Image (tube, rainbow, N blue to C red):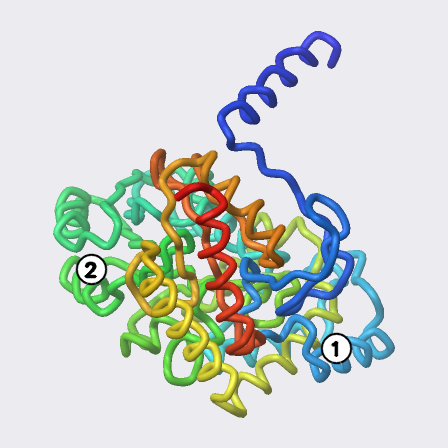
Amino acid sequence: MFDNVRDEVAATLDEIREAGLFKPERVIGSPQSAAVTVTAGGTPGEVLNFCANNYLGLADHPEVLAAAKDALDRWGYGMASVRFICGTQDVHKQLEDRLSAFLGQEDTILYSSCFDANGGVFETLLDERDAVISDALNHASIIDGIRLCKARRHRYANRDLADLEQQLKESQDARRRLIVTDGVFSMDGYVAPLREICDLADRYNAMVMVDDSHAVGFVGAGGRGTPELHGVMDRVDIITGTLGKALGGASGGYVAARREIVALLRQRSRPYLFSNSLAPVIAAASLKVLDLVESSNELRERLAANTALFRSKMTEAGFEILPGDHPIAPVMIGDAAKAGRLAELLLERGVYVIGFSYPVVPHGQARIRVQLSAAHTTEDVERAVAAFVDARAALGE
């Protein structure tokens, strides 16, 4: 059968390449860290990594690695089951309790990824009598999760409170309404105005859900994310997030929410009911990560300093960076092919970054999304800026 469609698939791949949108995979032969060794997909050798979600530099932290090794001996490699059959260990419950306390929520349920967490919320809570009101730039996992439910779909322009209020007015006949937003928008580094969103939710009797994947661990005074930053930890009904970014960089996701919502998810959420349990080694290592996050501000302060240094140096060098103070620092290029070529030139100069273009970002808004880490040194940041300047010159800009 595939022979009948082979040429069509190959033609589609050719179109992607010709448009400059093909996404090659570089192979890394070392642990995730501030510097990594590229073995394929680029010039081989050690390079500075400025495109990982390793915000706190914990992906290869010795205490996290030690906790993971101990967990292998104590809990084993995998559960070979889903949670409600025989896939729940003490370590899973410990992590859920710990996340609930850390995020200021009543209960937490673990998923194999945040994509699955977002895929399991909407269908469980909403049906054709309800409405979901989603920010236009929400993550793909939120968009796909919404598609799985039968609720009416409303969309408001990114962080546009007037448009959000209009959607709330137009959906007042719904039984339940759920406003959903990213806490931090991953392509821009912009932070959602959660206090104002919660004010509108109170006024129009709606619930609020936040995907805080690019914030938990380092945003807010205690690293508890955008609800802490905006002082609304007690006003957000549902928080989804990942263990695969600042919280160790492995995999796994969660929903932290009102007690009744989590209880219903355990009974009806399909990605939870039909996916293997999170590997116990990840759960145990994540507990150690939370120890590190809660015990000191050092990593958050170092990340903030690196972010401020990069943003200021790049601006002084004449690059356009979207405003903000988040460690996602998008260097705007515009043309997709040019962004891809700039990324190649940077790799040749020892800096690993990736060009982002359509459909990940809108047409004409291609960029290099630089991501800072607490693992970077001041010298690393300055070397990256110098590489950008040199690569721009080589590009003829």
Kindly state the secondary structure of the residue where label 2 is placed: loop
Of labels 1 and 2, earlier in sequence is 1
Q: Give the quadrant of residue 152.
A: top left
Label 1: few (<14), some (14–19) or many (≥20) C-alpha neighbours in 10 Å: some
Disc sitting over residue 318 in the figure: none
User: Compared to 284, does 175 lie above or below?
Assistant: above
The kind of residue on which mark 2 rests is Asn
Look at the image and tell me in which quarter the N terminus lies.
Answer: top right
Asked if one can make out residue 268 in the rendered structure from this viewpoint, the answer is: no
Q: CA distance from mark 1 to mark 2?
A: 45 Å
Q: Position of residue 334 (x, y in %)?
A: 36, 40
Q: Position of residue 350 (x, y in %)?
A: 62, 58
Look at the image and tell me in which quarter the C terminus lies.
Answer: top left
Q: Nearer the viewer, residue 29 or 295?
A: 29
User: Compared to 379, does 203 lie above or below?
Assistant: above
Residue drawn at the location 22% of the way across and 62% of the way down: 197
Q: Nearer the viewer, residue 62 or 94?
A: 62
Asked if one can make out residue 151 in the rendered structure from this viewpoint, the answer is: yes
Label 2: few (<14), some (14–19) or many (≥20) C-alpha neighbours in 10 Å: some
The kind of residue on which mark 1 rests is Leu
Residue under pointer 1: 65
Residue contact between numbered discs 1 and 2, judged by CB atoms under 8 Å:
no
Q: Nearer the viewer, residue 124 or 297?
A: 297
Q: Nearer the viewer, residue 347 or 374?
A: 347
The extreme top residue here reads 4
Residue drawn at the location 84% of the way across and 79% of the way down: 74
Residue under pointer 2: 205
Residue drawn at the location 42% of the way across and 77% of the way down: 304
